[in-house]
Amino acid sequence: MARDQNRDRERPSNRDERERRAGIRDTYDRIATHFASTREYAWPEVESFIEAHALDSAAGIGLDLGCGNCRHAELLAAHLESVVGLDVSRGLLETGRERALERGFEVELVQGDAVSLPLTTDSVGLAVYVATLHHLPTREARRASLDELARVLSPDGYALVSAWSTAHDRFDETTGFDTTVEWTLPGGETVDRFYHIYAPEEFEADLIDSDLELREWELSSGNCYATVAGATASN
């Protein structure tokens, strides 16, 4: 599944941003084992999405983008013959490998960047992009990532995109903002994780402005969730 070579899309490339994204990768490598241990179960919104769209997407591969420990790749593997789990963190991918071996499901694990997906155009029938978009440090990177998802999604494919929002009860702000959220490791050490907290209308606007087709979106438990589709997806 080599990435197309004839694309001429601009990508964020300045040194500062590359360093920031590398820092986010290093953070999740550092906390991977403990983080994965707290992510045992799939989110119900993801379960509902996959159940609703799996039959329509059987011809393409499944993609868990920002797969972490592959709890959602496991759901995709129950419906699709081929599933890719992609994450920037090698440490998290190792936890996904362990889960797949323990639970007996097949997933192809790929270390990659959500801003430049190493997948061919129109190859993905069903994708889950959950709790990852908000870790990209600039709007340019987030928009590029959404456009990349649109590129790899087949014309009849669907994806679920989610991000933290200002509707979460831990935040007082009403406009989108950048912040860090502490992760506490066993023993009490804290590690800062970057987040862009979306205002709901900002989340909707970024999806509308991207190459994705926005079908519907909602707020649930302080998160924005959107169902998006390929350009000629059927009803």
Image: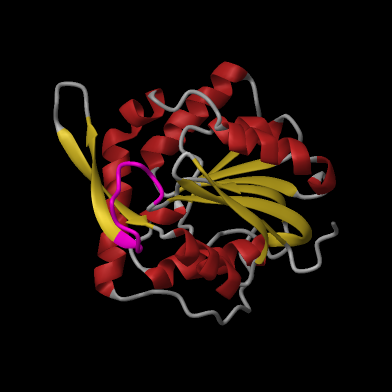
Q: Is residue 9 above or below residue 150?
A: below
Q: Which is nearer the eye, 229 or 64? A: 229
Question: Of 87 and 173, which appears nearest the observer?
Answer: 173
Q: Which residues are magenta?
A: 167-177
In the drawing, does residue 216 fall left or right of residue 111? Answer: right
Placement of 212 over or under 76, stated as above or below: below
Task: Examine the image and state in which quarter residue 213 appears.
Answer: bottom right
- Residue at image point 34% right, 34% down: 32
Colour pattern: secondary structure
Q: Is residue 107 visible?
A: no
Q: Residue furthest top?
A: 102
Residue 42 x, y percent position in the rendering: 55, 29
The N terminus lies in quadrant: bottom right
The quadrant holding residue 107 is top right
Q: Nearer the viewer, residue 164 or 63?
A: 164
Observer-nearest residue: 196 or 224?
224
From the viewer's perspective, tell me whether residue 195 is left or right of residue 156. Answer: left
- Residue drawn at point x = 35 percent, y = 42 percent: 169
Across and down, in percent, residue 138 comes to: 35, 67
On whether residue 68 falls in the magenta region, the answer is: no
Name the quadrant of the C terminus.
bottom right
Q: Does the magenta segment cover residue 171?
A: yes
Query: Is residue 123 left or right of 29 when viewed as pictured?
Result: right
The rendered magenta stretch, by its main secondary structure, is classed as: loop
**Image position of 4 with respect to 118: above or below:** below
Residue at 35% in and 64% down: 175
Query: Is residue 198 visible in this depiction of the protein?
Result: yes
Residue that appears at 48% across and 80% down: 10
Q: Position of residue 224 (x, y in %)?
A: 51, 51
How many numbered dots are placed on residues in this image?
A: 0
